[in-house]
């Protein structure tokens, strides 16, 4: 069942000047979607590097090991770009996004992935300061990294499936 | 002599092509994996290009940095070729007559030529300028700028295909 609040919100957005203008400009939507994909590429690369580091796939002596830290800022910028470009896409086609169960699932997965990433970042900082590192904590951190990889991949797939549901 | 339309018709009539075009789940899944492949290719290539142009990652030694990332690029490219071919055969003649599709392949070709030129000409004395924080010669920088531009256009054309089919 569709939440009446979301349905009303979708209708309200659809009636705005911005939404109606975007509906007539397919090329703007295409450009925004391209920017969205490029931001996804940046964010996915950063998240994979960070999670591979947590899993121990990227060892300390590996040439790409420092990349996980170097990609933190680009990842934050990419997240902001994703939010803004996503917002434009929602305004352009509110019903296609807000009323779509796959879009709703994507948003839930996104929140879970961000929580995992924040937890992982805090845990990695703690681990760096703790020389003797508790093995149970390390195992839990690896589990979070695996869950995080799964979540980001699911978000990527859900993004494409929105167009088909 | 066999014409192009005969080839596209042959491809479209393959049992696998019919299965992809008629099954409501297959095409979206293949497309989702195509997007995953794009994130791997673009994510890794842009990292190398950013290092090459001096936009970022200047403290990485170039040859070891690019060698470590090229594996991800080829893995992603392989997946993109497989998934892209599967999508292509499902509607070969329509894709072949699509301007965005033609442009995508033109710029894919240009990106390939740029890579070959870099490998044989622009990468000369890489063991000198490839050191962290060394000045990258203009020719190598140009190769990085061209690569960034060509791949950006490839992604944009890829997205544009969806709006013009």
Image (cartoon, rainbow, N blue to C red):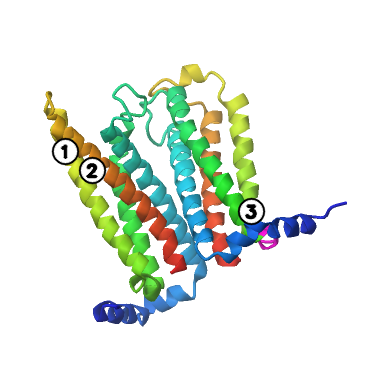
| Residue ranking furthest to the front | B15
Give percent across and percent down for residue B95: 65, 59
Give percent across and percent down for residue A42: 38, 45
Instruction: List the residue tagged with mark 1.
Output: A123
What is the chain letter for disc 3? B
**Residue located 49% across and 47% down the image:** B38
Instruction: List the residue tagged with mark 3.
Output: B103
Residue segment shown in magenta: B92-98
**Residue located 57% across and 46% down the image:** B82
Q: Is residue A65 left or right of residue B161?
A: left
Mark 3 and mark 1, same subunit? no
Q: Is residue B54 left or right of residue B94?
A: left
Camera-near label (3 vs 1) is 1
Q: Are marks 3 and 1 in contact (CB under 8 Å)?
A: no
Name the one closer to the observer, A100 or B51. Answer: A100
Q: Are marks 1 and 2 in contact (CB under 8 Å)?
A: yes
Instruction: List the residue tagged with mark 2.
Output: A144
């Amino acid at each position: 069942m569709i939440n009446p609040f979301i349905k009303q919100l979708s209708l309200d957005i659809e009636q705005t000047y911005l939404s109606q203008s975007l509906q007539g400009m397919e090329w703007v939507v295409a450009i925004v979607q391209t920017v969205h994909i490029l931001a996804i590429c940046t964010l996915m690369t950063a998240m994979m590097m960070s999670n591979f580091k947590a899993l121990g796939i990227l060892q300390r002596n590996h040439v790409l090991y420092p990349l996980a830290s170097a990609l933190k800022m680009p990842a934050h910028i990419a997240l902001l770009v994703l939010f803004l470009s996503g917002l434009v896409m929602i305004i352009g086609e509110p019903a296609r996004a807000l009323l779509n169960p796959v879009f709703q699932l994507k948003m839930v997965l996104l929140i879970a992935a961000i929580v995992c990433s924040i937890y992982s970042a805090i845990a990695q900082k703690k681990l760096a300061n703790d020389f003797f590192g508790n093995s149970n904590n390390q195992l839990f951190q690896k589990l979070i990294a695996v869950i995080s990889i799964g979540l980001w991949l699911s978000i990527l797939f859900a993004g494409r499936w929105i167009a088909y549901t | 002599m066999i014409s192009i339309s005969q080839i596209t018709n042959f491809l479209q009539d393959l049992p696998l092509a019919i299965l992809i075009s008629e099954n409501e789940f297959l095409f979206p899944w293949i497309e989702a994996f195509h997007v995953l492949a794009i994130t791997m290719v673009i994510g890794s290539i842009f990292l190398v290009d950013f290092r090459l142009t001096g936009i970022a990652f200047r403290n990485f030694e170039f040859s070891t940095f690019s060698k470590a990332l090229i594996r991800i690029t080829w893995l992603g490219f392989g997946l993109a070729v497989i998934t892209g071919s599967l999508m292509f055969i499902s509607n070969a003649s329509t894709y072949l007559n699509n301007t965005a599709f033609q442009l995508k392949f033109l710029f894919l070709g240009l990106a390939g030529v740029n890579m070959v030129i870099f490998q044989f000409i622009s990468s000369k004395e890489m063991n000198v300028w490839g050191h962290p924080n060394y000045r990258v010669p203009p020719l190598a920088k140009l190769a990085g700028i061209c690569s960034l531009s060509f791949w950006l256009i490839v992604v944009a054309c890829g997205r544009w295909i969806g709006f013009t089919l």
